[in-house]
Amino acid sequence: MSVTRRKFGKTKDGEPVTLYTITNKMGNSVSIMDYGATVQSINIVDADGEVIDCCLGYNTVAEYEEHTDFMGACIGRVGNRIGGSSFSLNGQTYTLAANEGENHLHGGLKGFDKQMFKAKIDSDDTVTFGRISPDGEEGYPGEFMFIVSYTFDDCDNFVMNYTGWNNSETLDTIASITNHTYFNLSGEDAGSILDHTLELYASSFTEVDEHLIPTGKLLDVENTPFDFRKGKTLGQDINADHPQLKLAGGYDHNFCIDGDGMRPCCTLMSPKTRLKMYVSTDMPGVQIYTGNFISESEGKAGTDYHHYDGIAIETQFYPDALNHPEFPSPVLKPRKEYRYTTVYQFSADE
């Protein structure tokens, strides 16, 4: 195991950006930069001995600053959408930055994805990134101190440990941190992921309106295109005549993961490389997003990205949870700790 670091350019404000690479004994590696605590590459050797970069991304900081696809980024203070860019907490209404029409998406105009983090190499397999989100940032109440630790071990487990603290003495805050890596297990330059098989352990999902904001209803996946419990390709039903798919142009929905505590969430597999990725988490939900709105831009290998070229598997609290008291609550009380974990394990089938 080893951790190396190298310069990765500068932000438009002149801040130097560093890329950290964790390499295990098999030669597989992950690279994360301190701009947005962003996963820039995941290199895994497949069963044929080929090195596959499994995540979409860019070669320069400027491209990450320019594009709004959130590629590989740590998302906070709250991931996903908040309807009307507002919520009420303890009798007070908080207005957030609106950055998707009238709604708030992925932490706002300058969420965690557009912030610099302080990085620390903790060990030969772990790098930790931290920042303090001040009271009022993007409209959120309370000072929130946050760290995310990325560990990549010799069993090809890519572990994301999210830890935060509400530093306020009196104010409640909310937190739902996720990661927005777009996975393509055939390679970041391989094109569509609609041939990938997804097995997802969720019996229900949150219905959304025309703005992709949850209505509050949980819909059963039984006999719908949203049933992945026995596994199927992402493309099998993506064009089905279902109103929820038409609203999103594909899958862009929160699934309610069966069970609780640390448990399996889903398995993704590429038929081309036979690489598999097993996801487990202790979060209540997961956003399955098939890259319906990926902007056409040049990726790391010089190939242009298009719609459906990557899938984001974003573990989370349900979207717009503060406006739906029946959903699991993302409220963090004063001086309380936030702690959740998601694991992405890679496997090369022979």
Image (spheres, rainbow, N blue to C red):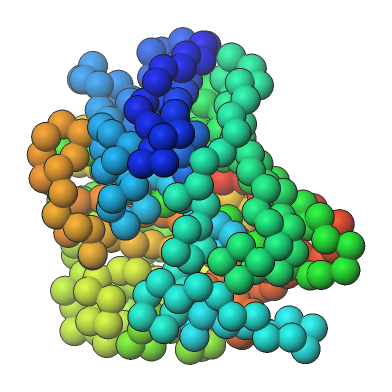
349 on left or right of 297: right
Q: Position of residue 317 (x, y in %)?
A: 59, 66
Residue 48 in the image: above or below residue 25: below
Question: Is 23 above or below relative to 80?
Answer: above
Image spot of residue 83 (x, y percent): 49, 83
Q: Residue furthest left?
A: 303
Say whether residue 165 is left or right of residue 75. Answer: right
Q: Quadrant of residue 287?
A: bottom left
The vertical placement of 69 against 215, above or below, is above
Residue, x 51% and y 80% (percent of image)? 85
Of 74 and 204, nearer the camera is 74
Residue 327 horizontal/vertical position (percent): 63, 78
Q: Nearer the viewer, residue 116 or 312?
A: 116
Q: Which quadrant, please, contains the C terminus?
A: top left
Q: In terms of image quadrants, where is residue 275?
A: top left
Residue at 23% x, 16% y is 49
Q: Observer-nearest residue: 44 or 324?
A: 324
Q: Is residue 255 left or right of residue 276?
A: right
For residue 338, say whether it is visible: no
Residue 7: tell me if it is visible. yes
Residue farthest to the front, as pictured: 13
Residue furthest out toward the right: 169
> Which residue corresponds to the image point at 30% horizontal and 69% vertical from the top-left?
251
**Which residue is nearer to you in this view: 113 or 229?**
113
Instruction: Quadrant for residue 148, please give it.
Output: top right
